[in-house]
Image: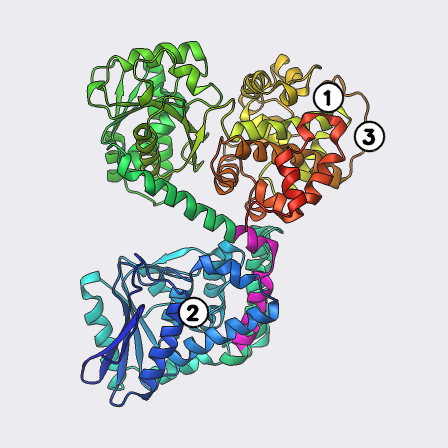
Amino acid sequence: MIYAGKAITVKEIEDGIAVLTFDLQGESVNKFNRLTLTELAEATQKLQSQQGITGLVVTSNKDCFIVGADITEFQELFAGSEEELVANNLEANKIFSAVEDLPFPTVTAINGIALGGGFEMCLSTDFRVMSTSAKVGLPEVKLGIFPGFGGTVRLSRLVGADYAIEWICAGGEKRAEQALKEGAVDAAVAPEKLMDAALSVLRQAIEGKLDYKARREEKTGKLKLNPMESMMAFETAKGYVAGQAGRNYPAPVEAIKVMQKHAGMTRDKAIEVEAKGFAKMAKTSVAHSLIGLFLNDQELKKKAKDLEPKAGAVKQAAVLGAGIMGGGVAYQSALKGTPILMKDINQSGIDLGLKEAKKLLTKRVEKGRMNASEMADVLNRITPALSYGDFGTVDLVVEAVVENPKVKDIVLREVEDLVREDTILTSNTSTISINRLAQNLKRPENFCGMHFFNPVHMMPLVEVIRGEKTSEKAIATTVAYAKAMGKTPIVVNDCPGFLVNRILFPYFGGFIGLVRDGADFQQVDKVMERFGWPMGPAYLLDVVGMDTAKHAGDVMAEGFPDRMSYSETTIIDVMFDKGRYGQKSDKGFYAYELDKKGKQKKIVDDSVDALIKSVQKSQRDFSEEEIIERMMAPLCIETVRCLEDGIVETAAEADMGLIFGIGFPPFRGGALRYIDSLGVEEFCKIADKYADLGALYHPTQGLRDMAKSGKKFFG
């Protein structure tokens, strides 16, 4: 044994060939934490001084290669100054450069996922052999940063500027075939042949049949572009990537600028440029928020995993009520492998549900994401039914009928008598109290809410709503089923609107008030879209549907009359009364017509002006700052209330619910992290400016106490 640590071992196996193996003890995956980096430095020093070593294979003893850097260490690391970050990166890069400079050829055998720092490790060796089951990539831009362990330098010189820009700025994962085609790896083989292939490449390099020194010169030298080619490649890419990423996500464009700047430099100088650019991005609020989101997501996954021992198996599911929503649930369940019965009282409903599933599957086939045979397999997992004949085999039922408590009560009691005593019943309701729906059930302990967001196949969130009598098994089983469907479940307690809609309607309340006080709704939409929302509040109401908003708003007003009821007619009331339901009726705040692709396109409708004026006391101009404050303060305060009321257990879950459920701008991290970014005291001052507008703008006492003590929701 040449080296033995807690994350890395190195041993000689034959004829001077050594194998460096990543195997981080106590972890299911390998990652670059402080321990692993320290041991890599020590192991490399041992290899430099070891007599008789003629070549090195780098591999992993886990299913993955290395998933990347340990992101849990980022927040502490990024809290330092830019200068400290640059120094840390340069220190880490010395380790990767030492691997690259070993006095013999090196090959990485990529057996599984190699992302971020994991793939940068692969790039530091002379050659890469990849398993056909593995994936590689540099996803750092998804965290608001870009590669900082030499990735922008080595990859651009290995595959060329164009491919490197696409890899780094898109942040995607590449399969072996694509990585080989683009020159990032040298061979792609079946998993069982990986080590033999890696050893074969290494022996060829040792024997001089492969020129490993020429490869090193290529990776450590300047980018092979003349000034005109360099300008064309990078300047064109900057414009395109800026358009794709948007102004709120600076890391992709900054990565291009960094690659352009170091294109004419050799490795060590180029790495200095990369380190400075990396530190600049690491200190942005965007990186702070996106890293926080990643950690929040890990927390959610851990909570879901902790429930697994209490969960029952869901081998057969059912959805009651076909149509668009039921068809979406059936599609998602079947796509992810859980067979599902889709019941409706009418054949027309069944036909609509199957049509929805077929439409979504056909799109996957057209995009090359599945073949016709796989599509048939998914459809075969959906069993249409007009009766309850096979419901005795069902483990979990999703009730997705019309949003009417009386209808839901009838359907739930009916199905409860026809399923096994241990079958879990769930209701896909967006507003109706789970405790209310449980009142007439014989086994309320087996009942909870399972609120999907529309469209089901696109929206990642599922709210799992706990009633007063809901058992832990019902919650755990529903959470497990949501995970199996590829969704992110968040467990919340019962209240009007649950978590997401309860918070969304104060946001709409801010909009109602702005329109009432004379704001131009199109200006409000544009301001909030610049703020980072995927669509402004008027456009969002058109997408949600004015009838849905009216119904949900009435529920919220009944539940929280002090801040969500209105003594005067609102613009939503007017739209509803005029039958302007939004996209579903082709008219709302905007009018809608089909574009060439058959998608609805919004256009300005001047006839709305008279309806707007009917609820306006006057008209005046609002600054962008005032619009943002009046829209965001109610949403943020209601998020705080949900946390204080125990509707949601943690700040992480509250923020993730908003991001996954209603498209809260990810780069701002969620409502509670947004309050943190302003400062709790400053946020309270902003809200107090609008205190005369009503209870929506009144911070809770708990929030004021946080302001006095200087506390934050995170960190």
Q: Local crowd at mark 3 within 10 Å, few (<14), some, or many (≥20)?
A: few
Residue assigned mark 1:
612
User: Which mark sits nearer the N-terminus, 2 or 1?
Assistant: 2
Q: Quadrant of the N terminus?
A: bottom left
Please tell me whether residue 536 is drawn above or below residue 411 in the rendered image.
Answer: below
275 drawn magenta: yes
Point out the tag, 3 or 1, that comes first from the N-terminus: 1
Element on which disc 2 rests: helix
Evaluate whether residue 99 shows in this view: yes
Q: CA distance from mark 3 to mark 1?
A: 13 Å
Depth check: 45 or 96 in front? Answer: 45
- Furthest residue in direction bottom, as rendered: 51
CA distance for labels 3 and 2: 56 Å
Residue 375 in which image quadrant: top left
Q: Answer left or right for 334 relative to 574.
A: left
Asked if the residues shown at circle 3 and circle 1 are in contact, with their CB atoms under 8 angstroms apart, the answer is no
